[in-house]
Image (cartoon, rainbow, N blue to C red):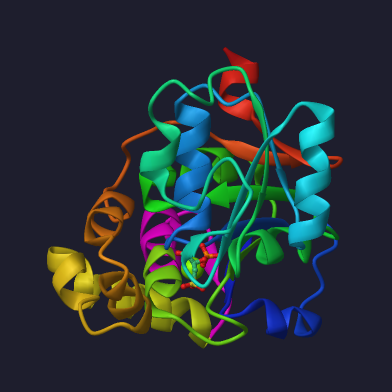
Amino acid sequence: MPSIDVCFSPELLHLYDLKGKAVVAVDILRATSTMVTAFAHGAADIYPVMQLEECRTYAEKGCLTAAERDGVKAEGFDLGNSPFGYMSGNVQGRSIAITTTNGTRAIRLSEAAEEIVVGAFLNLQAVADHLSKLQLDVLVVCAGWKGKFNLEDTLFAGALVERLQDRFASENDATLASLYLYQTAKQDLPGFLRQSSHVRRLENLEINKDVEFCLQHDTFSVLPVWKQDRLINLQRELV
Ligand SMILES: O=C(O)[C@H](CS(=O)(=O)O)OP(=O)(O)O
Ligand SMILES: [Mg+2]
C-alpha cells in the first residue's frame, strides 16, 4: 500500500526525499485555489515563478502576468492572487505566469518529485482520484506562510488524508495531526479559521469573500499537474 505524509512548510523539504513521489502542493489562501479557478475558467497553462522580475518577462511571450506581494496585486501586473480575478472570461485560452508569496515557491521547490499536483479544497476529489490511480507515495507540501506553519493548508492535508485513508498508509504523526485537525474543524471551516493568521490578514484587506470561496469543497474537477516548466490541466488533456 502506498503511503501519505505531510510536510508543513517548504522550509522542511530538505528532510524529505521527493524522488519517485507524488507531491500535492497546496496554498489554500490563495495561490493554489486561484490556479484551480483559472484552469476551471479555461486557462491554457500556468507558469509558477518565484520572483517578480522573472514573472514580468513572461509578458513578452504573450502571457498574462499575475503577482501578489503582501496580500495585494503587485504594481504593473495584469492580475493579482484573488480567484475572483480569473472568472470573467479574461483567462480563457491564455497562458499565465504567476508569482505569490508562498504558493508558487512551494510548487517550484518540489520539482524533484515524480509528479506535482496542485491541490485545493476546490478540486479535492479530482486530486484524490488522481492519486489513487497513480499509486505513488504521496507528500502533501503545505505552502505555509513565509516558511511557517499555517492552519488552512494543514486542514487541506487532513481532508485529503480522510479521502485516501482506506487506500494509503498514514506515514507518521504529521498525517494523523492533519486528519484530526480536519475532523475537528470540518463542520465549520470558516468559523475554525476565524482566528488564523491568514484570515486576519485578509480581513484587514477586506477580502473575506476570497476565504469563503477557497474553503468550498469539490467545486471544480480540474487537475493541474507540473509538466517540464509549467502547470497544465490534465483533466482537460484526458477529455
Ligand atoms: O495572496 C495571498 O493570499 C498570500 C499572501 S500572504 O500570505 O498574505 O503573504 O499569498 P500566497 O502565496 O497565496 O499564500
Ligand atoms: Mg497561503
**Residue 165 as seen in the image, left or right of residue 118:** left
Q: Does residue 180 appear left or right of residue 69 in this picture?
A: left
State the count of labels: 0
Residue under the image location 80 percent in, 66 percent down: 18
- Is 129 located above or below residue 171 in the figure? above
Residue shown at the point (20%, 77%) measured from the top left? 194
Q: Position of residue 64 (x, y in %)?
A: 65, 34
Quadrant containing the C terminus is top right
> Which picture quadrant has residue 57?
top right
Q: Residue furthest top?
A: 239
Can the viewer see residue 145?
yes
The residue most toward the front is 76
Image location of residue 224, percent across then percent down: 60, 38
Depth check, front residue: 90 or 137: 90
The image quarter containing residue 228 is top right
* Residue nearest the observer in this picture, 31 or 65: 65
The question of residue 160 being in magenta is answered with: yes
- Residue at position x 44%, y 55% in the image: 164
In the rendered view, tell whether residue 208 sits above or below residue 149: above
Instruction: Point out the image quarter for the N terminus.
Output: bottom right
Q: Quadrant of residue 233?
A: top right
Q: Nearer the viewer, residue 27 or 65?
A: 65
Q: Position of residue 216 (x, y in %)?
A: 26, 49
Q: Quick check: 190 left or right of 94?
A: left
Which residue corresponds to the image point at 78% horizontal and 66% vertical from the top-left? Answer: 109
Q: Residue 60 in magenta? A: no
Front one among 62 and 36: 62
Residue stretch in magenta: 157-172
Q: Position of residue 43 (x, y in %)?
A: 58, 26
